[in-house]
């Protein structure tokens, strides 16, 4: 009898804890995990692995950084948004 009550109490405690959590990213790890989860949901298990940020703005920023004449290693963190990295070898901004 007591073990069952303890399990129910533990379950209710965990459910109350989870209900108060938010999916608002709070730092790089949380933002990266949430984005990766979204990519898996939208694109599936294999295609969801690709975290490349794509679009006109990304291409413009990468091309502008290349035109400065700086080595890619010098500008790779400056051209990527927080929690992302520019990889010169692949010419992509990834998480």
Image (cartoon, rainbow, N blue to C red):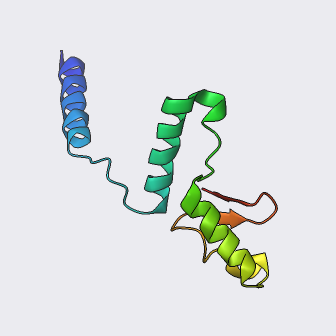
Above/below status of 67 relative to 40: below
- x%, y% of residue 72? 76, 76
The vertical placement of 56 against 67, above or below, is: above
Tell me how many marks there are. Answer: 0
Q: Residue at x 17, y 22 (%)?
A: 5
Q: Residue furthest top?
A: 1
Q: Is residue 2 left or right of residue 95?
A: left
Looking at the image, residue 69 lies above or below residue 29: below
Front residue of 75 and 67: 67
Coordinates of residue 80 in the picture (x, y in percent): 59, 68
Identify the residue at horizontal 47%, vertical 38% (top origin): 38
Q: Quadrant of the N terminus?
A: top left
Q: Left or right? Give the position of 2 relative to 46.
A: left
Between 90 and 34, which is closer to the camera in this rendering? 90
Question: Residue 26: horizontal and vertical position, in percent?
Answer: 37, 60
Closer to the camera, 65 or 18?
Answer: 65
As displayed, is residue 29 above or below residue 20?
below
Name which quarter of the figure residue 44 lies in: top right
Q: Residue furthest right?
A: 89
> Measured from the top left, where is residue 20 in percent x and y?
20, 45
Taking the image as drawn, is residue 71 in sight? yes
Q: Residue at x 32, y 47 (%)?
A: 23
> What residue is drawn where x is 48% and y is 61%?
28
Q: Is residue 76 visible?
A: no
Which quadrant of the figure has residue 14? Answer: top left
Q: What is the quadrant of the C terminus in the image?
A: bottom right
């Amino acid at each position: 009898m007591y073990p069952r009550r303890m399990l129910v109490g533990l379950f209710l405690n965990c459910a109350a804890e989870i209900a108060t959590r938010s999916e608002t990213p709070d730092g790089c790890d949380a933002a990266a995990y949430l984005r990766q989860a979204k990519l898996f949901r939208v694109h599936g298990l294999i295609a969801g692995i690709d975290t490349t940020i794509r679009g006109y703005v990304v291409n413009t920023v990468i091309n502008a950084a290349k035109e400065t004449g700086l080595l890619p290693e010098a500008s790779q963190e400056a051209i990527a948004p927080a929690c992302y990295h520019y990889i010169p070898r692949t010419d992509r901004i990834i998480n």
